[in-house]
Amino acid sequence: MCSSPVPSYSPLPIRLSKNSTSRITFWEWLTANFDAIESRYSEQSFIFGTLLNYSIEGLGSHQRIQEAENFLKRRNTKAYQRALDQGLESARIYSRWVERDREDVAAWFNKEGFI
């Protein structure tokens, strides 16, 4: 885990989860340090749930979502279940959007000269 103190509620997780390059790294860091982070926020389940929501919502593939579900299945998530459910639902919607529109979006970027 990082050695420098991070405020209890920092915008950093939001920024990491919204960046396509960092979102998977952020999820991997969170799962590798899950017990310590969950312990740190044990009395702030809303903040921990929000952190989970942000880390999960951008996973973007059915495989990653399944990995997240399998990882969390072994844990007691009752205190932050609503945020977790919201993150998983957002991830599923995002994943379906990517699956459905990937080719069209890539074609548009190509046509407009961005690629």
Image: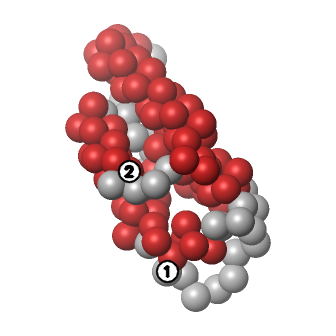
Residue 68: % across, % down: 34, 46
Name the residue tied to disc 1. Answer: 1
Q: Give left or right: position of 111 versus 37.
A: left
Q: In which quarter of the image is the C terminus?
A: top left
Name the residue tied to disc 2. Answer: 72
Residue shown at the point (54%, 82%) measured from the top left:
2
Going by the numbered disc 2, the residue's amino acid type is: Leu
Q: Give left or right: position of 60 versus 22.
A: left
Say what secondary structure mark 1 lies in: loop
Category of crowding for the residue at label 1, using alpha-carbon neighbours closer than 10 angstroms: few (below 14), some (14–19), many (at least 20): few
Q: Residue 110 is drawn in which quadrant? A: top left
| Residue 31 in the image: above or below residue 35 | above
Residue 52: % across, % down: 54, 50
Residue 65: % across, % down: 33, 38
Q: Do tag 2 and tag 1 residues touch (Cβ < 8 Å)?
A: no
Say what secondary structure mark 2 lies in: helix
Instruction: Answer yes or no: is residue 101 visible.
Output: yes
Going by the numbered disc 1, the residue's amino acid type is: Met
Instruction: Kindly identify which numbered label has been placed on residue 51.
Output: none
Q: In the displayed image of the protein, which residue is found farthest to the bottom?
A: 3
Residue shown at the point (37%, 34%) measured from the top left:
60
| Residue 103 in the image: above or below residue 81 | above
Q: Residue 94 is drawn in which quadrant? A: top left
